Image (cartoon, rainbow, N blue to C red):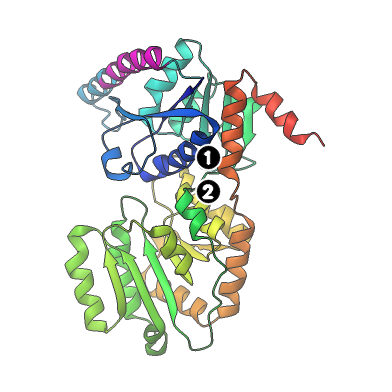
Amino acid sequence: MTRTILIAAGGTGGHLFPAESLAYALAPRGFDVHLATDHRANNYGSEFPAKEIHIIASATFGDRSPLGLLKSAANLARGEVQSLSLVRRLDPAVTVGFGGYPTLPPLLASWLTKRPTIVHESNAVMGRANRFLASRVTAIATTFKDTGLMGSGASRAVITGNPVRPKVLAAVAPYREPTAGGKIDLLVFGGSQGARVFGELVPPALERLPADVAARLCLVQQVRPEDMDRVGAIYARLGLDHEIASFFTDLPARIANAHLVVCRSGASSVAELTVIGRPSILVPLPHALDNDQKTNAIGLEKAGGAIMAEQASLTPEKLADLITGLVQAPERLSAMAAAAKSEGRPDAVERLADLVEFIASGGKAADFASKETRP
């Protein structure tokens, strides 16, 4: 008999990409996968292998005015009614949440109807939606050994790693060690939604590179649509070998081709950098709740696979110095690539799928963890 898994994820790439990876892994195990998400999935969920995608009403609490809070509460209440109906109709063996406020209604609906639930935390610090759910779910799958702010949920935590999409695993290839005086492939991206700061910071940084370093660069950069003309004109004036686009559908292959990556330190980006094994300059999103991106970046920097550069203090001059120093030290780039690779968990999706199957069969998180440690 085919069993149903309901996956709930916020509609950004950081939430949907690991959820998509799990969906691909569950299908061969005899599960039908349904996705509950928000309207943003239209941008990043086109390849999601779900039997059906269900758009659920949700909201954040960014607007703290009385009217804003009332609207948010009303949207979440509407999403809860939708989710209760959905859960009763699908009768999922497990509901798996990947973070973001759109996960709250489906996970709460499954909890209220006494069905098994799992949340996956991709960051080194538990997000607010997952933190709210932590005391209620059957199991918590984590990426890091020491995940912060788990509270009472720590007793139900299982380390699985952060799943990466099949196209990431397909892109894995040995690092091409830079040669003295040879071309350097530099990749700059800002996550699924882009990052305006790189359109503002990278062009003046590259203007400040020594001529011999600039001549060696082959640049691929994600640029927001509104900045394309301005950034493209600067690179054309510099005579820089470059390709710019607002979004790359083949980003894993671009990462694999890079000698050096400059990007944000969202959980999915860090997971892909480590599974593929590429050196990076990580610029955490400032003012992020609970400093999750900074914590992710610190972890990879400590492992030797990245350099963390905080946006508040990162000037074009400093970025130019960082890029120049790495380009002129190819042995350091190779060492960073190896260190990043050592942190990767290419088997994360299978470990998470094992946990889902175990919980679907009536198992408990503590039993799964003890099962894994037996000889």
> Mark 1 Cα within 10 Å, few/some/many (few <14, many 20+)?
many
Residue ID at (60%, 60%): 341
Task: Give coordinates of residue 173: x percent, y percent.
Answer: 54, 65
Residue at mark 1: 125
Residue ID at (45%, 38%): 19
Residue type beneath disc 2: Thr
Task: Give coordinates of residue 207: x percent, y percent.
Answer: 31, 80
| Along the line of sight, the residue nearer the viewer: 362 or 123 | 362
Please report the bounds of the magenta region as a residue range.
75-90
Mark carried by residue 295: 2
Q: Are marks 1 and 2 in contact (CB under 8 Å)?
A: yes
Image quadrant assignment for residue 247: bottom left
Task: Give coordinates of residue 279: x percent, y percent.
Answer: 53, 66
Q: Disc 1 to disc 2, how far (Cα)? A: 7 Å
Q: Main secondary structure of the magenta part?
A: helix
Residue ID at (56%, 29%): 356
